[in-house]
Image (cartoon, grey):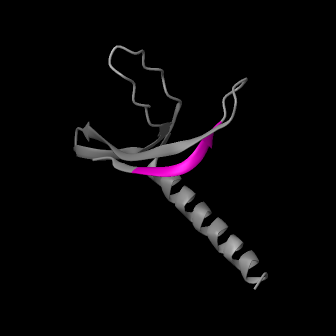
Amino acid sequence: MAKQNEYPGYVKLPKKKLYHANIRLDFNGLIRPDVKGVKLDGFSLRMFTLEKRFPLGKRREEQPEISVTLRPEEWLDLIVAMKDEYEAVWENHKGFD
């Protein structure tokens, strides 16, 4: 089942005005059948804005979306890189106290 979270963010598309929106982040494991059973193929990370509510009969617009698929090793590398960045920022923050 997807983990669904919303975070404040922004969307900037070429030749379009920047707009702030809640960005939804969905994270899914990609499991595929294999001759030996089931295999974890990787992880999918999707980011998109939520569709605005429209009255009945009104046209719905497409919402921006981006997705990446990472192998398990790439996902773990990303986690390590995020942890390293967090620790570096925290060290710099301590210098201001």
Name of the residue lying farthest toward the bottom: 97
Name of the residue lying farthest toward the front: 55
The C terminus, quarter of image: bottom right
Residue 46: percent from left, percent from top: 46, 40
Residue 90 shown left or right of residue 83 in the figure: right
Name of the residue lying farthest toward the right: 95
Query: Which range is magenta?
Result: 5-11
Q: Say if the magenta span includes residue 21.
A: no
Q: Is residue 55 above or below residue 20?
A: above
Residue 70 visible in rendering? no
Residue at image point 43% right, 20% down: 60
Residue at image point 75% right, 76% down: 92
Residue 66: percent from left, percent from top: 53, 34
Residue 9 visible in rendering? yes
Residue 43 shown left or right of residue 97 in the figure: left
Residue at image point 65% right, 74% down: 87
Residue 9: percent from left, percent from top: 59, 47
Residue at image point 44% right, 36% down: 50
Residue 3 shown left or right of residue 71 in the figure: left
Residue 28: percent from left, percent from top: 36, 46
| Magenta part, dominant SS | strand
Q: How many marks?
A: 0
Q: Say if the magenta span includes residue 10.
A: yes
Q: Is residue 69 above or below residue 62?
A: below
